Amino acid sequence: MGLFGTGDAFSAGAIAQPTGITLSSGQWAKATSHTAWGVFSNQTFTDLHARSCAFQGHPGLPIAGRGTYKTDDGSLEILPLPSYSDVSYVFTNELAVIVHDMVRLYYYTGEPDDGSPLAPMSNRNPSLEKAENIFRRLLAWAAGLPLACVRGDQNSPETMCMHMHFHAAVIALFQPFIFVPLQRLKFRSFDTQGSALCAFNSSVNQLKRLVINYQSTFDLLGNLLGPLGGTMSLASSLCQTGPSVERKDDHVRRHYFAVCIKGLLRIVSRFEVIKVFIQGLLALALSTQTITRQYAESVMGEVKRSENPSLSAMAAEHLTSNVVVDYELALTDRSAATCDRVAATLGDLSRSKRIEPTVDADHVMDGDKMDMV
């Protein structure tokens, strides 16, 4: 439809309606705006978790609830929000613009991501200064949220998903700076004594609360991208190791990892690809000694019992996932850090890497019964 990379001056009225379709200017403006921003935001947040960038430009159309369109009589009116959403729609799309600028800075290669390996992150040399600039924009966005969109226990599922996207973006933003001691640098452009690692850990802690609140309040089948992305970001972050990553409170780490796995187990029978997500996370967690072999075997037993024969037959051996779970490996080989590639190592790890249990596997499996922190 020619809706991306068209410049800020582009208007919905400039897009010709397809032959045979007759809509008022308001209906056509809604259709083009909702389509453009829906595709853009969903692809952007998908790219966030795949550590890739599928396209370079932003939609050149007004955001519903914020922008205006010209009516048939020449007057200006605010584009109405989609009937299925609330005011968080506006701020989610505005967040997507910032996140897209981040993934474009970090991952854009000049060609659409066709699944071929991207250049390693280390060759792109994202500077802490540029990361701080993006972080400043994210903080300004958060400070500008209306009361209805501020995080709280009574948030709508759309608002809660928006906050998950925000914290997943912060995690991805500072991911390159948490593994090497030399890069555990203090922020230079902020008055506070913050650091990339502090920001990373803060968003991990916020995701803990968001994932638990979402799982206990809403159906995971309703809106998958937000809660699934938040769950994967949290579980992956809990498994990271490195000189700058503090691995204290392993009992707490296992608890929240188990919460993430329990959420995925609830929907694995409906979406076969969730099995790949679970296997990838288990393989990563085993390799970093976040979980025990007994726990991994227990989870895979649950997956086996939950299998949907019709879905399994259709999927066969063709399931893949480009979601990145091994953040450290992604710095040098993004394609090897994806969920399906990491999941492929699960059998070898569970057979050959003996990890002595430090906590009862069945107890960890039932995360809801453990003390909340």
Image (spheres, rainbow, N blue to C red):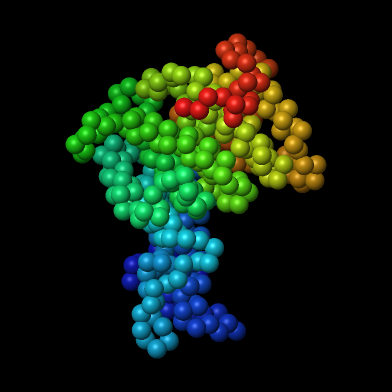
Please state which of residues 223 and 186 is positioned toward the viewer in this rendering. 223
Give above or below for 372 relative to 169: above
Expressed as whole percent of the image width and height from the top left, the position of residue 238 reads 49, 28
Residue lying at the far left in this picture: please name it.
Answer: 191
Expressed as whole percent of the image width and height from the top left, the position of residue 97 reads 38, 55
Residue positioned 49% across, 77% down in the render: 28
Position of 54 compared to 271: left or right?
left
Instruction: Give the image quarter of residue 347.
Output: top right
Residue positioned 33% across, 71% down in the render: 9
Expressed as whole percent of the image width and height from the top left, the position of residue 267 reads 66, 42
Residue 2 visible in image: no
Expressed as whole percent of the image width and height from the top left, the position of residue 361 reads 64, 19
Give above or below for 223 relative to 357: below
Position of 283 compared to 163: left or right?
right
Residue 181 visible in image: yes
Residue positioned 45% across, 71% down in the render: 80
Residue lying at the far front in this picture: please name it.
Answer: 154
Residue lying at the far top in this picture: please name it.
Answer: 356
Give above or below for 67 relative to 219: below
